[in-house]
């Protein structure tokens, strides 16, 4: 049976991703949807992208764009780097590219440029790194950066009265646009939680792998959760984004 796995923000923790793939034991039929933020944090950003490129040759893979991936793309394009990027894991990413020749870098840039801002599947499930602001959905979004920066969708969902039902006039139109919405971007570890957080039909799969949490995959039909070790334990000599 074909399974679909959604994978949260990796942030250069290739060892954690390999642990998940080991647990999942994927078959050629399976599909992977990656929610973005492949780079910035742990020391293996460039190798993570290389691994994802190799996975896409064997499996049906969809790669969503995260804000960190956009920063990395701009750096590879020779644009000036945002100081916020350098202090948010960008320095570790730059170091991870040392020793890569120009053709390897060009391949990485091609990957980053081909990321998609969001994906809507055949069952009207939305997969997006951060969120969107338009009540008419991401197709009507005015600001492209919202796809990989917006936190208002998430903050709205977690602050909702749990008893509010979809037929109520105050029920958020953004949530009614889709059967399910899968996001990353805001670590659940910010709230002391190391497992995916589900509010109404919104699922946050970023369990803080860039900081002090595990990397998470979820199989979306069964809602089976797979998790790596706490990423800090996999890179004991490093601090990731815990600065
Ligand atoms: Mn992000």
Image (cartoon, grey):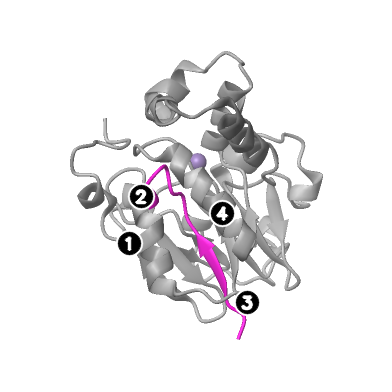
Q: Where residue 192 appears, x then y in whole percent?
A: 28, 54
Would you say the beta carbon of the disc 1 residue lies within 8 angstroms of ligand 1?
no
For disc 2, the marked residue is 209
Q: Earlier along the polypeptide chain: callout 2 or callout 1?
A: 2
Q: Earlier along the polypeptide chain: callout 2 or callout 4?
A: 4
Q: Where residue 19 appears, x then y in whole percent?
A: 35, 63
Q: Marks 2 and 4, how far apart in space? A: 21 Å
Mark 3: which secondary structure? loop
Q: Marks 4 and 1, how far apart in space? A: 20 Å
Mark 2: which secondary structure? loop
**Which mark is nearer the camera, 3 or 4?**
4
Whether residue 234 is visible to the viewer of this picture, yes or no, is: yes
For disc 1, the marked residue is 228
Q: Earlier along the polypeptide chain: callout 3 or callout 4?
A: 3
Density class for disc 1 (Cα within 10 Å; few <14, some 14-19, many ≥20) is many
Q: Earlier along the polypeptide chain: callout 3 or callout 2?
A: 3
Report the quarter where the N terminus lies. bottom right
Q: Which portion, as a residue range, is magenta?
A: 1-14
**Which mark is nearer the camera, 2 or 4?**
4
Mark 4: which secondary structure? helix
């Amino acid at each position: 049976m074909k399974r679909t796995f959604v994978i949260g923000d990796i942030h250069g923790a290739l060892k954690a991703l390999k642990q998940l793939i080991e647990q999942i034991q994927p078959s050629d039929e399976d599909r992977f949807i990656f929610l973005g933020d492949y780079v910035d944090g742990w020391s293996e950003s460039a190798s993570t992208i290389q691994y994802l490129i190799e996975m896409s040759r064997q499996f049906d893979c969809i790669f969503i764009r995260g804000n960190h991936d956009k920063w990395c793309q701009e750096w590879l394009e020779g644009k000036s780097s945002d100081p916020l990027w350098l202090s948010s894991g960008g320095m570790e990413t730059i170091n991870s590219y040392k020793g890569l020749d120009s053709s390897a870098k060009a391949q990485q840039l091609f990957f980053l440029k081909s990321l998609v801002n969001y994906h809507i599947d055949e069952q009207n499930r939305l997969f997006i790194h951060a969120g969107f602001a338009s009540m008419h959905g991401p197709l009507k979004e005015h600001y492209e950066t919202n796809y990989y920066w917006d936190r208002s969708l998430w903050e709205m969902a977690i602050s909702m009265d749990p008893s509010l039902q979809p037929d109520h006039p105050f029920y958020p139109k953004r949530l009614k646009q889709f059967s399910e919405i899968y996001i990353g971007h805001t670590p659940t570890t910010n709230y002391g939680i190391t497992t995916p957080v589900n509010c109404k039909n919104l699922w946050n799969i970023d369990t803080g792998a860039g900081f002090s949490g595990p990397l998470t995959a979820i199989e979306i039909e069964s809602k089976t959760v797979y998790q790596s070790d706490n990423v800090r334990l996999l890179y004991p000599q490093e601090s990731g984004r815990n600065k």
